[in-house]
Image: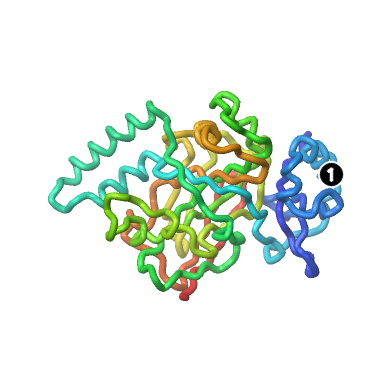
Amino acid sequence: MVTPFALATVTDGTAERPALVVDLDGAPTWRDLSDLAPTVHALLQDWDAALRTLYALTDEATRPLEQDQIRCPFVPGQILQAGANYRTHVIELAVKHAPGDRPESEVRAEATAAMERRTTESEPYLFIGLPSAVTGPYDDVVLPAYSRQHDWELELAAVIGREAFRVDRAHALDHVACYTIANDLTMRDLVFRRDMPAIGTDWYRAKNAPGFTPLGPYLVPVEFVPEHPRIRLELNGAVMQDESTKDMICDVASIVAAASRTTPLRPGDLLLTGSPAGNGIAHGRLLRPGDIMTGTITGLGGQRTRVVAP
């Protein structure tokens, strides 16, 4: 019987080390992988060979792992993000941002029809993130003082393990090594440029502050992740997001294929796949100092992030 495992970056008190972790949902234990590679990112560079070796090492992952030892799982190369990729989420945003003189029922019906067209066309909306925004799954998030509307967006993220360039959807998942959790935090009041409305959205300034992408705790190989994992975020114990990836407009394969048409995807690149319904803008409750976000995705472990003032 195959023992499920994951990759992580762990500190042993002296240095951060790549680690093989087993029993993610119980009492996790780990094995130092420094004898194989200096970092998790380096392990991904020859994923097929690494994977064969990792299968053979699960019995050696015997050191108890404490939460305070876990760091950001890896530093990604390119970060590509799929926006507006969950039907219910997009409909919620359309209703929230609609002019006040339009009936909600009309806006909702119009947005629902648009989602049906997008599902048929299956063309992801992609933009670029920065590795400098990535932080660990238990690190504090500092809210920048230049924004007043800080929001959460818990997402399934795919980690590339085999180079992909102009691959078709049917073969796209062959290039994904692992999945992980990302919380793609957003400053809602900075998404649209009021000084240049014709340009539209400005995701660079709205999403890329330091620490605005809590990642991990683990990179879990694709074979250990269910087809439609459930994405759940709680704010101070209250459930805000709770949806499976069945509500995606464009699935992971479509996102990988679309991204690879423009640029080669290389081992260690990270693709965020969009956030389901239940963001703060829809609830009318945005982040405040002192808030605690707890995010889980089936089979991938969980994050716990405290929000602090600048």
Kindly identify the residue that appears in the image at 57 percent across and 60 percent down. 132
Closest to the observer, 68 or 271: 271
Is residue 303 visible in this depiction of the protein?
A: no
Closest to the observer, 77 or 144: 77
Is residue 130 visible in this depiction of the protein?
A: yes
Residue 148 shown left or right of residue 212 in the figure:
left
Count of marks overlaid on the render:
1
Residue 208: x and y in percent read 49, 59
Kindly give the residue lying farthest to the bottom in the view shown.
Answer: 310
Amino acid at the residue labelled 1: Leu
| Residue where numbered disc 1 is placed | 57
Residue 133: x and y in percent read 54, 60
Q: In this view, does 156 lie above or below 145?
A: above
Kindly identify the residue that appears in the image at 44 percent across and 70 percent down. 144
Kindly identify the residue that appears in the image at 38 percent across and 26 percent down. 120
Quadrant of the drawing holding the N terminus: top right
Disc 1 crowd, CA 10 A, few/some/many (<14, 14-19, 20+): some
Kindly give the residue lying farthest to the left in the view shown.
Answer: 101
Q: Quadrant of residue 187?
A: bottom left
* Colour pattern of the rendering: rainbow
Residue 111 shown left or right of residue 131 in the figure:
left
Q: In this view, does 207 lie above or below 43?
A: below
Residue 209 shown left or right of residue 194 in the figure:
right
Helix, strand or loop at label 1? It is helix
Kindly identify the residue that appears in the image at 75 percent across and 54 percent down. 39
Q: Is residue 266 above or below residue 236?
A: above
Residue 56: x and y in percent read 84, 40
Residue 310: x and y in percent read 47, 75
Q: Is residue 260 above or below residue 74?
A: above
Kindly give the residue lying farthest to the top in the view shown.
Answer: 170
